[in-house]
Image (cartoon, rainbow, N blue to C red):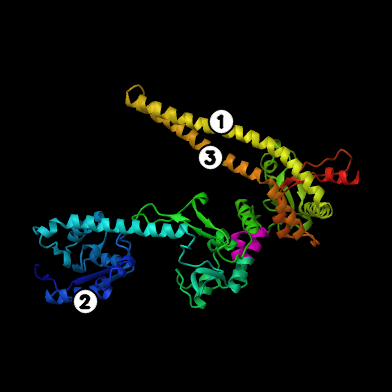
Amino acid sequence: MLGATTNTNKITALYCRLSQEDMRLGESLSIENQKSMLMQYCKEHHFPNPLYFVDDGYSGTTYDRPGFQSMLDEIEAGNVAVVLSKDLSRLGRNSALTGLYTNFTFPQHGVRYIAINDNYDTADPNSVNNDFAGIKNWFNEFYARDTSRKIRAVQKAKGERGVPLTVNVPYGYVKDPEDSKHWIVDAEAAAVVKRIFQMAMEGRGPSQIATQLTKDEVLTPTAYKQMQGRKTPQSAPVNPYRWQDSTIVNILQRREYTGCTVNFKTYTNSIWDKKQRETPLEDQAIFYGTHEPIITVEVFDKVQQLRQQRHRRSKTGKTSLFSGLVYCGDCGEKMYYCTTNYFEKRQDFFECSVHHKHKADCKTHFIRAVVLEEMVWMHMQTVISYILRYEDHFRKRMQERMRLEGEEKITAWRQQLAKSEKRILELDRLFIKIYEDNAGGKLSDERFSMMSGNYEAEQKRLKADVQQLQQDIQVQERQNENLEKFIQKVHRYEDLTGLTPTALRDMVKAIYISAPDKSSGKRRQDIRISYDEIGFIPLNELMKEETA
């Protein structure tokens, strides 16, 4: 090795790194061992002003490490003369980037780099050890790839057995003292989770829920866990009661609250690209009944459905019980909730969104909110009362009705499904044909590009249609099961004395408002209610049968 640098004012950077995988290899790679080795080398070779830069627990596949970035800042500021590391792998395990730093960045700033165990020193470019540095960097990268594959294989095996892969237990649960892989309910936090889902069932959005919890000074999940002495991935919040919309969204999306374990929710493209991407629901591994539920499956599914409906908030900030549920009976479009700060409650109304924007495209559709509330409650009250009195008859008639409708729908859907799947296969053959024609010179590159683009777009649309048709068929085939679920809901609300947000959102899927009829000299208006799970109920027909 060559001697020390002559500039005694600059730093000798002693860089240490240890990843979680390296910890398993023993004491020789420990941070303390690296520090001792580097300092000893520094003294023996009379390098001045030694300063440690440490990354403990960071992978070598990325250079986005606080210790390394701090050292890089000093290098770019011209404050570093020499960088020492135990070996090349401590600097990093990305062969391309490691070579970039040692061959370009460091020399550009006049920095000498030494990897002690690899006998690598940029001050001696003619050294044979320097010639082999590229090969060593490649082996270091290969080691990282191999380690990553092994870890992924172990995680995959665990995940497929139903072992929870998440390190951080969801807010509302704590680890079982007798079994760290089992979660038990944290009563205090679970009460908050239930409240959040309850507010969502009432039609309140994430920002409204967050505002209410902040106002009520409920500790945020991070603040609550830290108060109990538990570790959290986030640092302590400045305001322990300040809830964020994103926190509410994360809670509302966690299927684990229904008592199941969900693995493989996210994935990364490679060991270099650490960005977490969402795995499609059908590719996730879900294990039911692994711990005590906080939220029922029905409530969770209903909340997901409600969250897909974008509620239009008025400029006044006022919201309606029916926001997101009301549709025009003629054009089928949503109806806007209209109010001002000067309106009394009886003056608030819903208006067809199409008529609101283009009056000629739809008739005058509006209904006062108080009238709508009265009509919906009367209809729900009648439905609940009828089913409680004539449950067997209701079940029998609805099963017959759904069977007839279902058979027609399923037949039509299966025909469309077969046609779409046939066209997808045909497009595959057409694509191969134009590819061969292009390769053989029969089809120009421009024409090939246009045709292949059209085929790919059509195939993508058809595949989406096939997936939707398959889902529709599955839903339709479960109609009897859905009917029983609805009847159970009715029993839950048999003592209901007035319309509540929870009952409305739980039982009703959509409300359709017809245009007013003034032919009799009085304003008459009808509504049609599509109930959750079963759709429209022919209430008048059923009641006539019972009174006949």
Q: Is residue 533 in sight in this rendering?
A: no
Amino acid tagged 1:
Lys
Report which residue position mark 2 lands on. Answer: 36
Find numbered disc 2 in the image and state the secondary structure of the residue it sits on: helix
Q: Is the residue 17 above or below the residue 108 in the image?
A: below
Find numbered disc 3 in the image and state the secondary structure of the residue it sits on: helix
Report which residue position mark 3 lands on. Answer: 464
Report the span colored magenta. 195-210
Earlier in the chain: of badge 2 and badge 1, it is: 2
Which-is-in-front pick, marks 1 and 3?
A: 1
The image quadrant that residue 497 belongs to is bottom right
Q: Quadrant of the N terminus?
A: bottom left
Say if mark 2 contacts mark 3, CB within 8 Å. no
Q: Position of residue 301 (x, y in %)?
A: 62, 55
Which-is-in-front pick, marks 2 and 1?
A: 1
The image quadrant that residue 209 belongs to is bottom right
Amino acid tagged 3:
Ala
Instruction: State left or right for residue 296 relative to residue 220.
Output: right
Identify the residue shown where x is 11% and y is 71%.
Answer: 4
Q: Mark 3, residues whose alpha carbon is within 10 Å: few (<14), some, or many (≥20)?
A: few
Please tell me whether residue 20 belongs to the stretch shown in magenta: no
Q: Where is residue 77 in the image (x, y as percent from the top left)?
A: 24, 66
Residue lying farthest to the top in this orientation: 442
Report which residue position mark 1 lands on. Answer: 419
The image quadrant that residue 145 belongs to is bottom left
Please tell me whether residue 196 belongs to the stretch shown in magenta: yes
The answer for how far apart the CA atoms under marks 2 and 1 are is 72 Å
The answer for how far apart the CA atoms under marks 2 and 3 are is 60 Å
The answer for how far apart the CA atoms under marks 1 and 3 are is 14 Å
Residue lying farthest to the right in this orientation: 548
